[in-house]
Image (tube, helix red, strand yellow):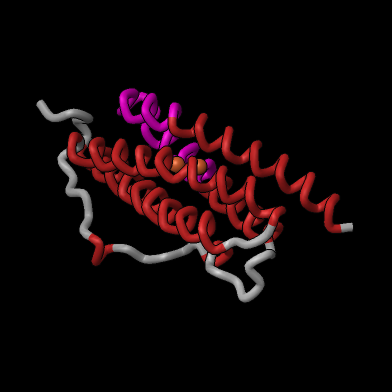
């Protein structure tokens, strides 16, 4: 008997997992780029933090991919990728740390909103996915709080 017996429910969960997988993959791309593109003394801590997050976000992508397969889905190939993270694209001013921090906050908040939706969709039908996504959600909440703290400090430094 397949995991998550209700086929319609399973398809709905796989669709949301696939979206989550792409969000993580795009975050990996954005964090690698921003951890390298930024310049200046004020950028150093942000670059280090983003570089460290890359591996964590990649781990999330692998967890989502594994769960897609377990639920009889297919992990998409690169042709299925559609970028969304406009705020994390490279800027002409490579010392503009504040806008990178804001872009990271936007990405993390977007992930949090999507994962809460995913957990709610699983509800009683799929406690295993709900449990996995809850653990990932906790990581993203940690990232969000960290970068909110960075923003507080960096916006003060701007005045
Ligand atoms: Fe993540
Ligand atoms: Fe994150």
Residue 149 rendering spot, x and y as whole percentages: 72, 40
Figure quadrant of the N terminus: top left
Image point 15% across, 40% down: which residue? Answer: 72
Residue 55 rendering spot, x and y as whole percentages: 40, 41
Image point 54% across, 52% down: which residue? Answer: 107
What span is in magenta? 111-135
Against 122, residue 92 (above or below) is below
Residue 102 rendering spot, x and y as whole percentages: 66, 55
Q: Nearer the viewer, residue 118 or 24?
A: 24
Farthest residue toward the right? 159
Q: Is residue 89 magenta?
A: no
Q: Quadrant of ligand 1?
A: top left
Image point 37% across, 39% down: which residue? Answer: 60
Residue 106 rendering spot, x and y as whole percentages: 60, 53
In the rendered structure, the answer to whether residue 118 lies left or right of residue 9 reads right
Q: Nearer the viewer, residue 20 or 39?
A: 39
Q: Nearer the viewer, residue 17 or 8?
A: 17
Image point 56% across, 45% down: which residue? Answer: 48
Figure quadrant of the C terminus: bottom right
- What secondary structure prevails in the magenta region? helix
In the rendered structure, the answer to whether residue 119 lies left or right of residue 49 reads left
In the rendered structure, the answer to whether residue 68 lies left or right of residue 49 reads left
């Amino acid at each position: 008997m397949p995991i998550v017996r209700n086929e319609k429910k399973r398809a709905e969960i796989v669709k949301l997992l696939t979206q989550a997988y792409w969000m993580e993959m795009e975050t990996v791309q954005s964090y690698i780029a921003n951890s390298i593109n930024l310049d200046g003394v004020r950028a150093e801590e942000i670059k280090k933090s983003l570089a460290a997050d890359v591996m964590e976000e990649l781990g999330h992508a692998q967890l989502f991919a594994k769960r897609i397969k377990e639920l009889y889905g297919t992990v998409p190939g690169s042709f299925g990728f559609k970028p969304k993270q406009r705020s994390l694209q490279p800027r002409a001013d490579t010392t503009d740390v504040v806008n990178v921090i804001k872009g990271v906050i936007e990405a993390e908040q977007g992930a949090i909103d999507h994962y809460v939706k995913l957990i709610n969709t699983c509800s009683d039908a799929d406690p295993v996915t709900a449990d996995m996504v809850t653990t990932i959600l906790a990581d993203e909440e940690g990232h969000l709080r960290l970068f909110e703290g960075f923003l507080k400090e960096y916006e003060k430094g701007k005045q």
